[in-house]
Amino acid sequence: MNPKFTAMFAVLAGILSGGLVISLIEMASPHTPPAGLNLNDAEKLGAWIATLPISAFLILILAYFLGSAVGGNVANRVAAKSHYRPALIVGFGLFVAGIMNLIAIPHPLWFSITSSLIYFVGAWIGGKLFVLTT
């Protein structure tokens, strides 16, 4: 198979698998929006987010880390000859999605900074785990 196609497929598979892990962890979180909250009303959404305990944000940080680690690992497994590049591209793709989320939904500053960095750390660790196991 063409190496460029393999690399593109690896990144796509990594981003999709990472996004799936993030979504599953978010759905399992005990911190769900109250019934009737209009998610398109930024003011009311921001007011609800301000009431969330720190554990809600830590669950999200964990979800982002695990999702990017799984995504980085999947990408490196699919593109076995390129050890780090696919994983870090997955981290960048998830980072862009995370930035879009931070722009759309108000979050505490500490969370915005931490979550923006965690994608790259998770993807690098996931990619490194593949290298260590081969």
Image: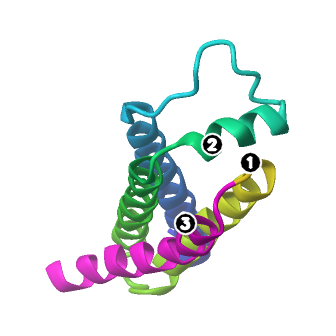
Q: Can residue 53 be seen in the rendering of this structure? A: yes
Quarter occupied by residue 3: bottom right
Give the Cα separation between the discs numbered 2 and 1: 9 Å
User: N-terminal of the two: label 2 or label 1?
Assistant: 2
Q: Is residue 47 above or below residue 60?
A: above
Q: Say whether marks 1 and 3 touch (CB < 8 Å).
A: no
User: Which residue corresponds to mark 2?
Assistant: 49
Q: Callout 1: few (<14), some (14-19), or many (20+) C-alpha neighbours within 10 Å?
A: some
| Mark-to-mark CA distance, 1 and 3 | 26 Å
- Magenta range is 107-134
User: Does residue 78 belong to the magenta stretch?
Assistant: no
Residue tagged by mark 1?
A: 105
Q: Is residue 134 visible?
A: no
Query: Residue pushed farthest top?
Result: 36
Dot 1: what SS? loop
Q: Earlier in the sequence, mark 2 or mark 3?
A: 3
Q: Quick one: label 3, few (<14), some, or many (20+) residues within 10 Å?
A: many
Earlier-in-chain disc, 1 versus 3: 3
Do the numbered discs 2 and 3 sit on residues whose CB atoms are within 8 Å?
Answer: no
What secondary structure is the stretch in magenta mostly built from?
helix
Q: Secondary structure at mark 3?
A: helix
Residue for point 49% across, 65% down: 10
Q: For the point 30% across and 83% down, which residue is it?
A: 128
The answer to if 129 sits in the magenta stretch is yes
The amino acid on which the numbered mark 1 sits, given as a three-letter code, is Ile
